[in-house]
Amino acid sequence: MKKLLLPACCFLMAYDLACSAEIKGTLQQVVDGQTLVATGTVSVGIIAPGEGTRLDHTKAVGEAYAAQRIARLDSEGKFTLTNVPEGVPLYLSVFMRSGFGKFQTVTLATGQVLDVSQVVPDAKSGGVSCTGEITWPAGVVFREKAVRSFVLSGKNNNWVYIGGSRDSGRFKIENVQPGIYRLGVHSPLQNGQDRYDEVEVTVPANLDTPLQITIP
């Protein structure tokens, strides 16, 4: 993991960034028809040059944690992040303990205060159990017993689902709304490096058999 975070830390050190912006908000979540206080964490990472549309969610969140730009939702679902960098592309992530997450890319102006208050949709209704198995190209060797992280995100970085798998490419993510998603997979390689792959997947309303996904 340190090898993953070092480039991001170096990126921070290479630029003398102004940090007068602020991000705050109040988050609630609908569970079984009731609107409750959301629980989880919020982080802000700097998007490194070259990330573009193939944004490695794990890498961006890792940069945020390395820089300690994180906040926990309090007992009322509120949070405030101060001294946020301005004038650079940022990766704002909200991880809910229900398994839902929110990813948003923003660039803040000098002194801007961004309010991201919202109500999270019900995480327990209307979805399907999405299972699948990923196959990587021959010759790709992963670290033994390493955990791979999966992020199933909407094409516009709307609400997403987070999961993980140990020892294999099998995954299971509960309560997924049918639709077209980007499946991002972060995996640690045997040579000590980290690999990120992203493919488009369609989750049907009736998922009778596991999705078979082949990484090119």
Image (tube, rainbow, N blue to C red):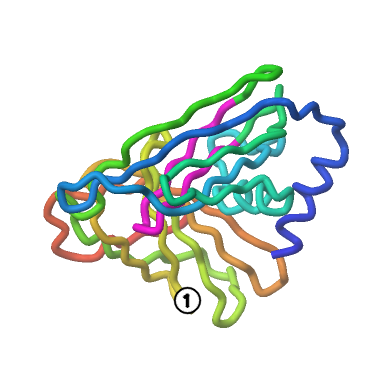
Residue that sits furthest to the front in the current view? 75
For image coordinates 66% across by 53% down, the residue present is 65
Q: Main secondary structure of the magenta part?
A: strand
For image coordinates 41% across by 53% down, the residue present is 39
Residue that sits furthest to the bottom in the current view? 144
Q: Is residue 210 above or below residue 48?
A: below
Range of magenta residues: 91-106
Assess whether residue 96 is covered by the magenta stretch. Answer: yes
Q: Is residue 58 above or below residue 171?
A: above
For image coordinates 40% across by 64% down, the residue present is 134
Q: Is residue 64 left or right of residue 149?
A: right
Q: Quarter of the image holding residue 6?
A: bottom right
Which residue has dot 1 on it?
166
Q: Is residue 46 above or below residue 21?
A: below
Query: Camera-side residue: 77 or 100?
Result: 77
Query: Camera-side residue: 203 or 81?
Result: 81
Residue 84 in the image: state x and y as whole percent: 68, 33
